[in-house]
Image (tube, rainbow, N blue to C red):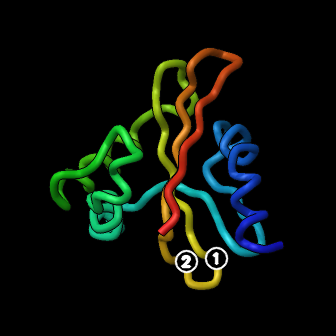
């Protein structure tokens, strides 16, 4: 598998991950964001070429840390809520992006992701 094929199945993963916390392929892993990653999340999410395509961009590293905290206590898969997960390179366990899903209805999910 290459990174492109890994990314093409992110949508399927997100639907599955509603019920679990981690999922992985041979190259990437999806999982909860860590407070230690606030600096990295802030760095790429505050880049104008990235936040032009997102509804949320952090105004500070502290804002990113608070976002991660809110995500850690948010329940999984409630209708009307976004849930954000980190995308990690498995070989280095480095955060390389994030993936979010919004449960519009019981049967409809919107998915978005950022890869740096």
Report the residue marked by disc 2.
93
Place of residue 12 in the rendered image (x, y in percent of width and height, measured from the top left) = 75, 44
Identified at 39% across, 39% down, the residue is: 73
Q: What percent of the width, then of the height, locates residue 82?
A: 46, 33
Q: Residue at x 39, y 44 (%)?
A: 54
SS under mark 2: loop
Callout 1–callout 2 Cβ contact below 8 Å: yes
Q: Residue furthest right?
A: 1
Q: Residue furthest bottom?
A: 92
Crowd rating for badge 1 (residues with CA inside 10 Å; few <14, some 14–19, many 20+):
some
Name above or below for residue 81 compared with residue 114.
above
Measuring from the top left, give residue 115's x and y in whole percent: 52, 64
Mark 1–mark 2 Cα distance, whole angstroms, equals: 5 Å
**Tag of residue 51:** none
Q: Nearer the viewer, residue 8 or 14?
A: 8
Q: Which residue is mark 1?
A: 90
Q: Residue at x 26, y 58 (%)?
A: 46
Decide which of 26, 44 is in the foreground and name it.
44
């Amino acid at each position: 598998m290459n990174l492109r094929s890994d990314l093409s199945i992110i949508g399927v993963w997100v639907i599955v991950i509603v019920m679990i916390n981690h999922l992985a392929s041979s190259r990437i892993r999806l999982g909860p964001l860590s407070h230690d990653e606030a600096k990295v999340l802030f760095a790429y999410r505050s880049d104008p070429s990235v936040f032009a395509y997102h509804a949320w961009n952090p105004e500070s590293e502290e804002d990113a840390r608070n976002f991660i905290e809110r995500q850690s206590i948010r329940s999984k898969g409630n209708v009307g809520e976004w849930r954000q997960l980190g995308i990690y390179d498995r070989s280095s366990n480095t955060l390389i992006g994030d993936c979010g899903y919004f449960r519009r209805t019981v049967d409809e999910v919107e998915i978005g992701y950022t890869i740096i």
